[in-house]
Image: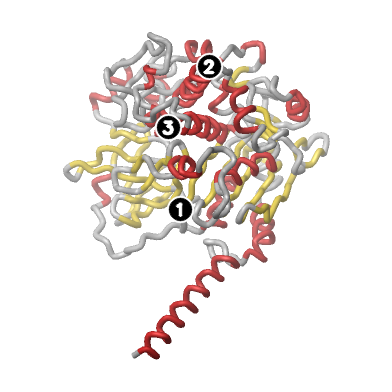
Amino acid sequence: MRKLTLIVLVLLFCCASVVSANEDVLTPSGIPYSELKDRVDEYVSEYIGTSSAGANVLIIKDDEIIMNTSYGFANIENQIKVTPNTVLEWGSVTKLLVWTSVMQLVEQGKLELNEDIRTYLPEGFLTKLQYNAPITMLNLMHHNAGWEDRFIDLFYKSADEIKPLEEMLHIVTPYQIHEPGTIVAYSNYGVALAAFIVEHLTGQPFYEYVNEHIFSILNMKDTSIHPTQQDNLNIATKRDAVFGYHGSEGELSISKNERIYIGMYPAGSAIGTIEDLAKFMTALIPIDGENSPLFQNNRTLEEMLTTSDFYDNGFPRNAHGFWEGLYAVDVLGHAGNTDSFSSNFIFSKDNKLGVIIMTNQKNEVALSYGLPTLLYGEYSPANENQSMPHVQKHEGSYYFARQPYKGFSKLYGALNITNIEITEPNRMNAFGVTYEQIAPSLYQSTDGSNDHLHMTLNNGQIEKISTLTSDMIPVSQSSKIFKLL
């Protein structure tokens, strides 16, 4: 009996060793790390010069940069190539600096995530509320405080138009449309408001706070968050040498706006090198036994990177402002888009594996979303034999909760209706893409983009459809009338 037990233990140890060895040599998608750069190069080469002007791609594994490669041009006209020292715009990846700052204050006992944010704001600061329900910092992190979106007052063509953050927030104050906690609608205003709370509690302009408590700590000397780069003028000079591009039918053209400035700058104004951004990522996934330099204790980091919001079908959606993607392994991160730049910042805390993609291309998709799938693998449900709700009930018209509801731009929202069409059992078309139901109320795109739709059912009827950053609501006759009023 003792001999049998010993054999079993030896077999278990050998199996565990094989699993551990595979984790060391293979990416979650099954690519040997020794072949990873060649596979990435091959993938990227299909798009550089056709759908993207230039890009930087950096991969981190176990606290080390295992790949840092540049592609294409920062300035096609003058044949200036992208290099690791090229500064590119982060876009909404900047928001992760806000949530990190918030969690630093939580750790210090200066802020409670479940407290009504009006406790931390000047009296009467929020002027367009429809509901008396509290708005918490978690609502801001989850983008479900209920605010409408605005298509104006986000980008400015002149640095002279940029005002201090508090003043900008008053200029762009949106109306609250939904009760807090009920509908997710991505909100730049909500993130900028969270940054102002950091500003108000610390007595520092937010850009100064980030420079002192994040950039300086991580030695990020080649990054600026100030809306006009006044905190690092060297970055402003380097940014002037880079052009942003638009693409249409395989043709790349310089953006009409050589520079844009973001009034609500904490929501998307960071500019820097990819190696600097990698320092931030490394601090979020320290190797075992090491503390993150961003926090006094790794318990705060663990709290920040723990799921805090779920889709109605039970899948994780958001971890204190970090969006959770569906791949073969659990990942966290944030994508970003500005007027002419796109980026993606994704990491697996369990695998200590992260990838950063930065491009000077407007609305770039193939690299920003294709490369993470190449690295992490596509999600597949654990139980493929589950009973699926009938897809026919999902057919109809929907509108994104993230849209304007007031002013002249509300007409765009009223006309921007998405139609969902059933094409065959457990398949439907939306946004020109085919989605297949792979788990109850979970649909996955079939075009390789690894996009997912989550369904919320109420008595068998669709209550809402959720993308990663916004819910979609069924269009009824009453909602059509409401949207046009």
Q: Residue at x 28, y 65 (%)?
A: 385
Compared with residue 421, is residue 64 higher up or lower down, i.e. above or below? below
Amino acid type at mark 1? Asp
Residue 380: x %, y % from top left = 40, 60
Point out which mark residue 330 bears: 1
Point out which mark residue 141 bears: 3
Q: Residue furthest top?
A: 124
**In terms of sequence position, does the residue under pointer 1 or pointer 3 come before the other?**
3
**Circle 3 sits in a helix, a strand or a loop, which is it?**
helix
Looking at the image, is mark 1 or mark 2 nearer the viewer?
A: 1
Locate residue 439 relative to residue 347 in the image: left or right.
Answer: left
Compared with residue 322, is residue 41 higher up or lower down, i.e. above or below? below
Instruction: Using the rendered view, name the quadrant where residue 228 is placed.
Output: top right
Q: Nearer the viewer, residue 68 or 299?
A: 299
Residue 444: x %, y % from top left = 40, 52
Residue 158: x %, y % from top left = 66, 15
Q: Which residue is mark 2?
A: 153
**Circle 2 sits in a helix, a strand or a loop, which is it?**
loop
Q: Residue furthest right?
A: 78
**Circle 1 sits in a helix, a strand or a loop, which is it?**
strand
Query: How far is the residue under mark 3 from the one under mark 2?
Result: 22 Å
**In terms of sequence position, does the residue under pointer 3 or pointer 2 come before the other?**
3
Q: Are marks 3 and 2 in contact (CB under 8 Å)?
A: no
